[in-house]
Amino acid sequence: MATEKPLLENLSLNQITTEYWSLKEAVDGCVKADIPWISLWRHKIDEIGLSESKKIITDSGLKLSSLCRGGMFPAVTAEQRQKSLDDNRRAVEEAAELGTDVLVLVCGSAPDRDIHTSRKWVEEGIEQLVPFAESYGVKLGIEPLHPMYAADRSVVVSLGQANKMAEKYNANQVGVVVDVFHVWWDPDLYNQIERAKGRILGFHVSDWSVPITDTFKARHMMGDGVIEIRRIRQAVEQAGYHGPIEVEIMNQALWDTPGDEVLSLIKERFVEHV
């Protein structure tokens, strides 16, 4: 049975929510706010290097829920696709070194007006990456994005599509990441969550509010929009997922707010709306 409210012990700060904080500032903020999990973005790791990033995480005692991101498989030339695959292998190595077994895949867009071929390239990229990831004990989490991101971020645009891709593999190799912002609109959502039972590798929360004026920074704090967050969370739990719940919000107003205030608001809204 799903609990009525999630425990704060499952709360994870997805680092993009406090984009203007360095990795050290984000980690220190979580420790201060008693947020036990964090999810890292690779551009923040690049700022200080992998070894220093690992030391900061290890010394803090925080648990790492995932690494964002791998993916971006489609490209016009074979050389570019190979570079992407090489970068994905580095991402796998980083995830393993940092101590998480989940690499989130934002699968990539259609670079040449050929969305059908781009989806093939995504499937080929995952197929080539799976043995390498498995050798490091890292699972690949396919995150479907809202269809409005097909042109610049991902041609995988529904949970059904992600499930179909993931089901080609063992659940210990490839799964899905359910992000409420990207899937809330789907009329088949709850059937697809049930279909993903045993294969859900992550759960992300934010909210959808209109008007959307910046597609990348379009998310809002939980409770400020229309998403049935609690219902989706309960469905994900009924499908067997009881892991960390990442608060992932790209929003300029939040980025401009002092990070400690953001974390305080996250905890308040997490209890109230998740």
Image: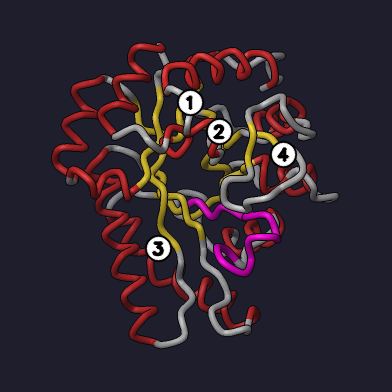
Specify the label residue 107 is tagged with. Answer: none
Of the residues tagged 3 and 4, which is closer to the observer? 4
The image position of residue 81, as x and y in percent, is 39, 79
Secondary structure of the residue carrying tag 2 is helix
Q: How is the image coloured?
A: secondary structure
Is 145 magenta? The answer is yes
Classify 119 as above or below 100.
Answer: below
Residue for badge 1: 257
Image: magenta residue range: 141-154
Residue for badge 2: 253
148, 88: nearer the viewer: 148
Amino acid, disc 1: Thr
**Residue 39 appears left or right of 174:** left
Distance between mark 4 and mark 2 Cα atoms: 15 Å
Of the residues tagged 3 and 1, which is closer to the observer? 1
The image position of residue 245, as x and y in percent, is 54, 29
Would you say the residues marked 4 and 2 are in contact, meaning their CB atoms lie under 8 Å apart? no
Secondary structure of the residue carrying tag 1 is loop
Distance between mark 3 and mark 2 Cα atoms: 38 Å
Of the residues tagged 1 and 4, which is closer to the observer? 1
Image-quadrant location for residue 165: bottom right
Which residue is most to the right?
A: 187
Residue for badge 3: 130
